Structures are given as structure tokens and as C-alpha cells.
Amino acid sequence: RVDILDPAILRPGRFDRKVTVGRPDVQGRKEILEVHAKGKPLGDDVDLMQIAQTTAGFTGADLENLLNEAAIYAAKEDRVFIQQKDIQRSFVKVGIGAEKKSKIVSEKEKRITAYHEAGHAILFHVLPVYSVSIIPTGTGAAGYTMPLPEKDEMVNTKGQMLQDIVVSLGGRVAEELVLDDITTGASQDIKQATAMAKSMVTKFGMSEELGLINYDSDSEEVFVGRDFGHTSRGYGEEVAGKIDREVKRIIDECYQKAKAIIGEHRGVLDACAELLLEKEKITGEEFEALFYE
Ligand code: ZN
């Protein structure tokens, strides 16, 4: 059972999301608890599934610690078996430690993340969705949505790049639709979308307005900028303004598209978020099924 106790799962994503380490999901936590409950008699009132449900964000080590501490509380009362109240007391102790280390997800945060990821997932619907999860990843990202790559692509088309931008805006769009406030959780998405739109305009000649010119000076500046006293940018204010407007136009159009698609599938958004809150992680098939309910 070593695999279950080691929550580190490498999941390379097509979009190079910074998601490499996953914590155990609710089912994983239940199995870890079962492993560590061996040799520790449990009272009738102990429900490992319920404990698994309330320990989102716990690592395998945190869960082991939880049961060990509970066993100590039981021993202090000269009991040979653990009761639910021992686990509750232990939870306070271990939970605070675990919160410092790994940040336990509050219910509100979980709900926001569930909707955020559901928003991405709906937009991914045109692509096969591999797995949707709201388990904290330990790398700053609260959750992740990942499509299976159709093939190893070295070249992106304009259409694909626009689609990537649409998908990356899905989290924020979903938050706006459902919650009365928006969060900072979409900052990575926005950064990614902006970088993609900017590359389209300045590197790949995908903007009619700017034409087939490379305005991305990062490789040329060493030769041209320094030697001839140009600005490192290599173009004037007018072009800079055009680039900014084109980037904004692309982002705005993708945002409107994301909003329209998610709006059309509002029922799926709610159902997906509900399912994520219940199970924390759903498969591509479970997600696809929501469209046919
Ligand atoms: Zn996101």
C-alpha cells in the first residue's frame, strides 16, 4: 500500500500548469485512514469515511498523525479503542499543524474552487477532459483541470491558441457567474491568457492589425538595441499602443466567448461544482455524463 501513502503524483499538463503534486482525494484519504487504523481498535461510533470527508488537504502523514494522536487520547482515558471524540480532539491538534503546513481548505474556498474548475472544465468540453479536482496541490494552485492531449503538438494554430485563452478565462467567468465577488485565484490564468494573446500579436503574426512582423525583441535587442542605441523594445509608441489594443481585443473576445459557453451550460456548471464538492475529484467520464443528465 506504499502507493497510497505517497500522495506525490506527477501529472504533466498540456497547458504546463504548475501542478505536479497532488494530495490524496477523499477516497485516497479513507484508504490511508484504513491502513493506519490497523492495530488500533476503533469504537462503533468512528466513521472513517466521515473523517476522510472532513480532512481535505491532509497528507498521508497528517492522517497517520491524526490517528496516532487519537490513540494517545484514548490511552489517557484507559480505553483500548478509539472513539470519535478522540479523533475530534486530535483533529484540533493535528489540524492546526496541518493548516500551517498545508492549508486546510475552508468550505467557502472549496466552493469557489469547485466553480472555478468547473468553469474551465466546461470550456474543455470540446477537448477530452482527463480529470477535474479541487484538492490543494501544494504549489499554490487550488485545483486543476486537465485535458488529455490529442497528440503531441509542436505547432499551435491560431484557433487552438484562441481556444486556450478561452479555456484559461473559464475559472474567472464561473466565479463571476455564481459568487457575489471575485477572487485572486484567477491571476495565473489571466497571466497565461495575456502572455498567449501577446505572443499571437507580437511573435506569430496572427493579428491583421499588426501584420507579419516580429515585435518581440527579446532575441534581437542584444544585437540591435544595444549597438545602435534603440530602445530595447525596438518600436515606437504608436505600435506599442496598437499591440496593447490588439491584446486587449483578443482577451475581451475570448472572455465574451467563455461567458457565452458557460452561460449556456449553467446547469452543468452547478452540477459539476456540486459533484466536486462531494467527491473532490471527478473523472472525465463523470464530467461528460453531466451534459446528458
Ligand atoms: Zn483557473
Image (spheres, rainbow, N blue to C red):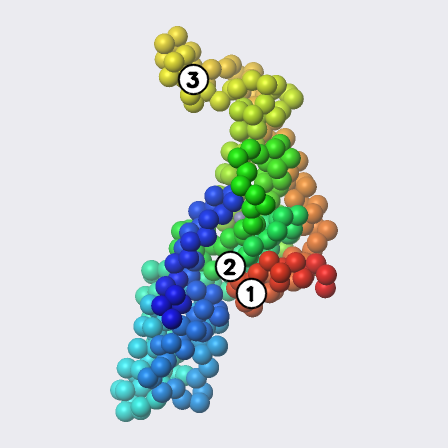
Residue 269: image tag: none
Q: Residue at 47% of width from left, 15% of height from top?
A: 234
Residue kind at label 3, given as amino acid type: Glu
Using the image, determine if residue 48 lies above or below residue 136.
below
Bin the neighbour count of mark 2 within 10 Å (Cα to Cα): few under 14, some 14-19, many 20 and up.
many
Task: State how many labels appear.
Answer: 3
Q: Residue 2: percent from the left, percent from the top? A: 36, 68
Which is more N-terminal, label 2 or label 3?
2
Q: Name the quadrant containing residue 265.
A: bottom right
Q: Element under label 3?
A: loop
Residue beneath the point at 55% across and 65% down: 277
Badge 1 is on which residue?
A: 277
Identify residue for label 2. 134
In the rendered view, tell whether residue 41 sits above or below residue 269. below
> Which residue in the structure is indicated by mark 3?
220
Q: Residue at x 45, y 69 (%)?
A: 28
Residue 68 falls in which quadrant of the image?
bottom left
Name the element at disc 1. Answer: helix
- Confirm or deny contact between disc 1 and disc 2 (CB under 8 A): yes
Q: Quadrant of residue 269?
A: bottom right
